[in-house]
Image (tube, grey):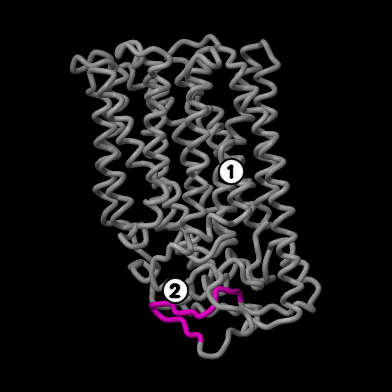
Amino acid sequence: MNIDVPCRMSARPQGLEINDKIRSECDMRPSLEPQVTSEAENDIVGKGPIIQEDPAMTEGGAVWRKLDYHILPLMAMYFFLSFLDRTNVGNARVAGLQKDLGMSNKQYSIALTVTYVPYIVFQLPSNLILKAVGPNLLLPTMLTLWGVVTVLQGVVKSYSGFLACRFFLGLLEGGLFPGLVLYLSYFYPRYMMNTRVTAFFSSASLSGAFSGILAYGIIHMDGVGNRPGWSWIFILEGLFTFLFGVFSFFLFPRSVDNSRFLSPAEKEYIKEKLLEDCDHKEEEGFSWSEVVEALRLPQLCWLFSIVAVYQELTECFRSFSPSIIQGLGYTAADTQLMSVPPYAVACVVALIASFVSDRYRCRGIVCVVSVLLCAIGFAIFLGSESNQIQYGSLFFSVTGACMAAPTQATWNANNASPQTRRATVIAVGFVFSNGGGILATWLLGGSLSPAPRYTEATITLLVFSLLAALMCGLNMFYLRMQNGKKAERRKTMSREDEKPGIGNHSSWYIYNL
């Protein structure tokens, strides 16, 4: 197959070649013609150059589909197992974990907090070393080891043993989500990222549905091997995670060049598209200056912080959904089943939203809609006394959370370059978000917001939802303003006049809105 897809963009500078090592002296997109009104306006709104080809309808679409078939199922399974192993504690709690280990509500919240502390600490170091160690080694190692820790949760006899397991589970899982987002950016242009991130993130919605069904069956093993039903939830799910982790060592390609399922022509085509998007540049080595530069980006420091904290508040709300549903009057067994429908709906809606986000390159609008859906759900839960209506509110809040998280992560990654700067931005965004997780564990699991109404927690989540919508709007305004300034600079200078190596600060790097 000849992978020679024409591109409606101006030619690259002479001497720029695409080879197995990808060498480029610029961090910018190929030159645009500012005087062409349609393209200039397109740049200001963050959509970048107009490319007439539809990746799904041209010869190049076959290349992306092949990449999808080999990469995305693996990413989805990783995130599915991560979310399953991190949140099955909610199902185990309903099945008797807290009672059997003699934990108070406060001790249960401490156990969840212990998970988040190493989870937060390891995210930035993990992303910074991912490229050096190789995702083909680092990610399977993390998965295999946390599978072992999950199994150990099922055999603990004391609260202190449970705390130790939760600590190491957080340590090993901390780098996964930011690592997967960074890893995908090695293979896909920015305008194709959100659908892919949501595709594997939606596995979290499936895990929320699947864990309820699985827990419903497993708790009937109560007494097998003289172990309680909640113990088997950890043992069986952790054993599968361990086996898949070992198997995945043989599946992970390190990079485009190391992807054995791609032909040489297909590899060249993918690398060419990455260069056209100016989102892929081989760096000579790690640089702390890029880390510092990432921390200075306004969209990270003062806008995304509250969005990220909100994101994890809603994620933790999902972790507590079995306890919330049980508080509506359902039995332990029925609770496991009733937790399935909200996640099933959320998975479908999130995939549709990601398609819209990529197709129209409107990350910010999708983020605003998602957090407003959460606000609607929290408002309904807060204002109603009916158990049926409160249960129905979960369809809004869980769906909004599933839409917001992958879109926010993709939006963050799309607007930072080169790779070290992007790795830092992704990781720090997740550090903010998991800080919100610590707050949520005390709001929903402790005495700060008593069950079954969770009034204080719901009010907090509602306020954060509205603030997050406001911050998303401000971020869209800020990025649009920056794109306008870049468009004006391009009218008075050429790429050759611009300092090399400035990444997303380049006048030819169009921010995604």
As helix, strand or loop, the secondary structure at mark 2 comes to helix
Above or below, 264 relative to 106: below
- Which corner quadrant of the image does residue 47 belong to? bottom right
- Which corner quadrant of the image does residue 371 belong to? top right
Quadrant, the C terminus:
bottom right
- Which corner quadrant of the image does residue 397 belong to? top right
Q: Is residue 509 left or right of residue 261?
A: right
Q: Position of residue 435 (x, y in %)?
A: 49, 36
Q: Which residue is mark 2?
A: 266
* Closer mark to the observer between disc 2 and disc 1: 1
Identify the main secondary structure in magenta: loop
**Lower sequence index among marks 2 and 1:** 2
Q: Is residue 451 magenta?
A: no
Mark 2–mark 1 distance (CA, rounded to whole Å): 39 Å
- Mark 2 crowd level (few <14, some 14–19, many ≥20, 10 Å Cα): many
Q: Position of residue 339 (x, y in %)?
A: 50, 24
Query: What span is in magenta?
Result: 16-29
Identify residue type, mark 1.
Ser
Q: Is residue 17 magenta?
A: yes
> Residue sitting at 68 percent across and 46 percent down?
472
> Residue sitting at 72 percent across and 48 percent down?
474
Above or below, 394 relative to 220: below
Q: Position of residue 236 (x, y in %)?
A: 28, 30
Q: 187 or 432, which is in the foreground?
A: 432
> Residue sitting at 50 percent across and 30 percent down?
316
Q: 416 or 6, which is in the foreground?
A: 416
Identify residue type, mark 2.
Glu
Q: Which residue is mark 1?
A: 305
> Residue sitting at 67 percent across and 10 percent down?
385
Q: Is residue 65 left or right of residue 352?
A: left
